[in-house]
Image: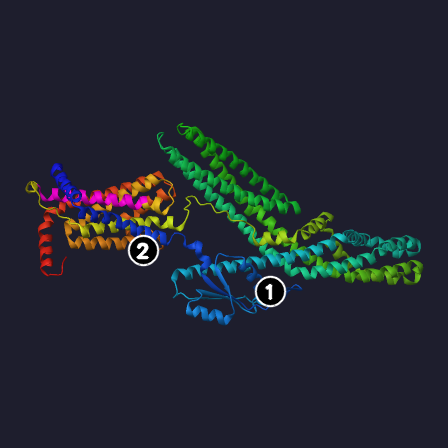
Amino acid sequence: MKWSNILKVFKRDVKAIIKNPIALLIIGGICFIPSLYAWVNIAACWDPYENTSSVPIAVVNNDKGASFNGKEMNIGNEVIDELKNNHAIGWKFVDTKQADRGLIDGTYYAMIEIPEDFSEDLTSVLSENPTKPEIIYKVNTKANPVAGKITGVAQNTLVNQITSNFITTVNETAFSSLNDLGYDVDKNKDNIIKLKNSIIAIDKNMSAIKNMLNNINSNSSNLSTYLEEVQSTMPSITSGLNNISQNAENTGTLINTSKESLNSTFDNIRLNLSESQTSLDKVQSNLDDLSSMANDASSAKINALISKSINEIDKVDNSVTAVINFLDAINKKIANEKIANMITSLKNVQNSLAEEKIKLNDLQSKVNSGQNLDKGLLSSISDLTKKIEGQVDNSLNRFDNDTRPALNTIADGLVTATKGASDLLGKANGLVDQINNLLSTANQGSQLANSTSEKLKNSLEEFSGVISELSSKLQDVSDDDLGKIVGILQSNPEFMGDFIANPFNIEVDAIYKVANYGSGMAPIYSVLALWVGSLILISLLKTESAEFEGSENINLRERHFGKMLTFVSLGILQGFIVAFGDKFLLGVQTVNTALLIFVSMFASAVFTIIVFTLMSVFGNLGKALAIILMVLQLAGSGGSYPIQVDPLFFRIIQPTFPFTYAISGYREAIAGPLVSTVILDFAILTIMGLVFILLGYLLKGPLNPRVRKFEDMFEESGIAE
């Protein structure tokens, strides 16, 4: 096979095109038509999710409202007010009849109904028989399948908004009630302490009091003075106990609800620390990749890996900072050694993260200045990453073993303290009257010692058990503990309500950001257009070489490859037009425009080699095979949906599709190239092109007589083109 003969066939085709205006016009149309297919489809889906505000969804509010903790509330009205300020969806606020009619005739894609007992059911969560509220969601999937997905997202958004609002409201109400209790406790703190000390003193001096009664004549004067001092505190103590007891009874249920929310927050803290471990694993993987690179590796690839590492470090720092802020807020109110140790541990992680970020920036600066990759600095960063991983792992273990139990103890303590206080105050209220009677009796006894001393002694014997039990419990509560409880109860209700409903903010960090949906879909539509272009070429142009002067000395293989040069040249031109229009006509986002154009031209050349070889070697059967290949690749190349959601058959054969690597190359050019991925894409496409060139070389000669016979018989039928 001579290269000169191959070029003769190619030159003959070029001259034929140039000399014939009609041929030149048709060739121009053939090269331009595939780009229209790509451009029209990309433009049609340029940014559909930015226009969801025009998707009509009916909203019906039949909620009659409910009373919650003495406050009238209507969740349905609150939701409607918020939706009126939400323009992401085309909300239509109508009645039930109009919504049902519009859903049937296609006026609305979906309908969301808030039933009349919604608020009542929602607030029943704090009752003995809670009822789970329902929102009625109806969708017209016949109108449009994608619209159904959009309305489903709208429904979830609505449910999440209601849930967040309700949790915030419940917790604000809970902490508002706790505020009232806190102020009452704070106001009567001195009286409570005085009562506590008096009861403890009575218990400790019970034997002495009994001895005084036994020696009443000599000690009655001292006993009277002591008991009068105790009795003087009773009126103020009685008033304080009544106020506190009332508030404690009303607040118990709300505190339990707040505790459940706090437990959810503690789970989120652990999740944040676990995700930090994942981010650090990614950093270590990037550093390992950098360490394995040669000194002449491209600065773009090095910079990409360093930038990824810095982004992961920032994510870990944000997570750690959020946890520190939360724990610090708790520790300021209730000082706890285990929580303080956890904060110190996390601050050590913060310091190490700051040190690593400085070193990564230093490494990147050296690379940008043209220096080789500093392996020593890289090794230092890798060691520091391993150190941070150990610190985070230790912090996670500390949280599980020390901090979480301490937080649970605080949450349980709040509930137990309030319940215990309620029980204690109930007993104290009953005891106050008895103590007053007892003290009155004692005073009379000091004056009439001989006649009443035995009666007073019997009374003390009767109440000594109650006094002893109450004294024992009161000794477990220090004055500082009472101050800490007051601090918690007086926390800002709006802040605590919102914090428990939404304890963390989600930071969205797009590593390879794509500006719009059209740019995201450009790879699949452009690559599909290139394959369609190659099909148009074999459909409108002959794959067999025409006879010309000197062609008698050119063999079948040389004619095949000469004609292939013509088709590949036209395919490359098609690829250039598609990519050029994507960028400069439609405005598709590109990080590397030159790479986009080169990927398009190269992929088009490979596609043309494959399709031309099938047609040249197998005739019309090859054309059918090329169409089947297109259908399979369109469904199973992962161009529109992640390949992981496709059936198993497509997941298995996806790596063998040319589309897979052409689409990947397009994405690298659009969103940001990773050199290793680009090299792999070009390598696989090159191998596929070479395989079909080899197939053409081996099969063109042996199969040609049989294919020609088959084609002739088909033409004799009179229905062939």
Colouring method of the image: rainbow
Figure quadrant of residue 447: bottom right
Q: Nearer the viewer, residue 282 or 699?
A: 699
Q: Secondary structure at mark 1?
A: loop
Q: Secondary structure at mark 2?
A: helix
**Residue drawn at (88%, 62%) of the image:** 454
First reached walking from the N terminus: tag 1 or tag 2: 1
Residue 53 position within the rendered picture, expressed as x and y whole percent measured from the top left: 47, 58
* Amino acid tagged 2: Leu
Residue 717 on the magenta segment: no
- On residue 74, the disc is 1
**Residue drawn at (41%, 49%) of the image:** 516
Magenta segment range? 554-580
Alpha carbons under labels 1 and 2: distance apart: 50 Å
Residue 571 position within the rendered picture, expressed as x and y whole percent measured from the top left: 23, 45
295 relative position to 550: left or right: right
CB of mark 1 within 8 Å of CB of mark 2? Answer: no
547 relative position to 262: left or right: left
Position of residue 175 relative to residue 676, above or below, is below
Q: Which residue is mark 2?
A: 648
* Amino acid tagged 1: Asn
491 relative position to 285: left or right: right
**Residue drawn at (10%, 58%) of the image:** 715
Which quadrant of the figure contains the C terminus?
Answer: bottom left
The dominant secondary structure in magenta is helix
- On residue 615, the disc is none
Structural crowding at the residue carrying mark 2, measured as other residues with C-alpha within 10 Å and reported as few (<14), some (14–19) or many (≥20): few
Residue 93 position within the rendered picture, expressed as x and y whole percent measured from the top left: 52, 65
Q: Nearer the viewer, residue 433 or 97?
A: 97
Q: Is residue 184 something one can see in this rendering? A: yes
Residue furthest out toward the left: 552
Q: Nearer the viewer, residue 533 or 219?
A: 533
